[in-house]
Amino acid sequence: MKIAVIGAGNGGQAYAAYLASKGHEVSLCDRNVEVVEALKRLSEIHLEGKLHCSGKPALVTDDMAQAIKGVELVMVTTTANAHKDLARQMAPYLADNQVVVLNPGRTGGALEFKQVLRENGVKKRVYLAEAQTLVFACRIVETGVVNIIGVKDRVLLSAYPSSDTQYVLGKLACVFDCFKEAANVLETSFENYGAIFHPSVVLFNEAAIERGNEFYFYRDMTPGLANLIESIDNERLAVANAYGIHPVSASDWVAYAYDNIEGTTLCERMRNNPAYYEILAPTKIDCRQITEDIPTGLVPISEFGKAAKVPTPIMDAIITLCSELLQRDFRKEGRNLKNLGFEGFTPEEIIRKINDETA
């Protein structure tokens, strides 16, 4: 299959190498010219750790038109706060029957992407879907070498509208066998656990980060902060339930997603998770744990809560404080109901539209 991978970060290099190693014709695209040129000079991209294989993309480029021309499948592996710009860049070049998958969509990714395509006049029959998370837990060792920390055997996926999900899964069957059908993109959206964990850890360690005090992001978790995170998570669960979605709690997810996790509380499970053990905190406040997880995570969850009249006071406070801290209006620039194309919709109308765009 001809596949485009958009984004040459951790996930993008891993996907490109793995797919090329399986015989697919892969084009890898990134806006960073230096990364593109460095990858062009390599004979192959190598995966190590849980996977040992190598693959050479047929094309490495910073040209979006060139990258997606003639491909059947477009795998987007950038951070979620890049989706809006990517949709604008792709809009002139997308073709009928191409499949675009956001890996992951975070919260409302496919909804935002489709809205931007509409605003840019795209009339082509494009199949759009989002995954709940990346297939690989991975980190770049150096350009062209990626350490695969883990490979997930079950990743929820839904198309928008959900009536297209089976078609997308059929296209993906020869690429990955881990994708499983979600009810709709609300299910993948409300499974955004990073948005629950990340902003609060940064916010409540703001002074330590600005002073340059190094600490472990998860291992140094405290009971008080873990309790606050669980309160935010309870708001997420309440909003999800209002839309007929019933995800597991953040604490249960940590135990479910990783093997042999010791502890009964969220604090204990985060401290004792080997996959989290060596992850250091960011070195600055202007980091993706804020700039990605607030506008593409907490904001849309809070906005869906407003539509369903489910209060999210703690979540709203985190959004407000982080906006003030970085002097940005995350509510305005993020995935609010207006930007997702659902301003004034009731939950019932949102669900109908998500399941079938013609509804």
Image (cartoon, rainbow, N blue to C red):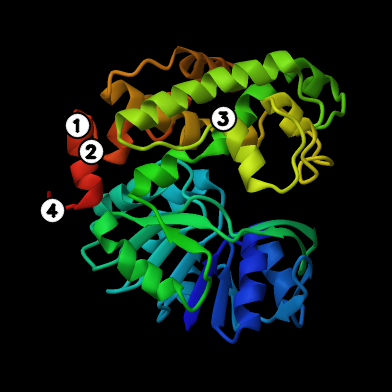
Reading the chain from its start, which is encountered first: label 3 or label 2? 3
Reading the chain from its start, which is encountered first: label 4 or label 2? 2
Residue 358 marker: 4
Residue type for callout 3: Ile
Q: Secondary structure at mark 2?
A: helix
Disc 3 versus disc 4: distance between alpha carbons?
A: 33 Å
Q: Determine the residue located farthest toward the bottom in the rendered image.
A: 23
Mark 3 or 1, closer to the camera: 3
Q: Looking at the image, do the residues carrying marks 4 and 2 touch, with CB atoms under 8 Å apart?
A: no
Q: Secondary structure at mark 3?
A: helix
Q: Looking at the image, do the residues carrying marks 1 and 2 touch, with CB atoms under 8 Å apart?
A: yes
64, 131: nearer the viewer: 131
Is disc 3 surrounded by few (<14), some (14 to 19) or many (20+) residues within 10 Å?
Answer: many
Residue 183 marker: none
Disc 3 versus disc 1: distance between alpha carbons?
A: 25 Å
Res 223 visible: yes
Is disc 1 surrounded by few (<14), some (14 to 19) or many (20+) residues within 10 Å?
Answer: some
Is disc 2 surrounded by few (<14), some (14 to 19) or many (20+) residues within 10 Å?
Answer: many
Q: Looking at the image, do the residues carrying marks 3 and 1 touch, with CB atoms under 8 Å apart?
A: no
Disc 3 versus disc 2: distance between alpha carbons?
A: 23 Å
298, 150: nearer the viewer: 150
Residue type for callout 2: Ile
Reading the chain from its start, which is encountered first: label 4 or label 1? 1
Q: Relative to 98, say whether 351 is above or below.
A: above
Residue at the spot of label 3: 196
Disc 1 versus disc 2: distance between alpha carbons?
A: 6 Å
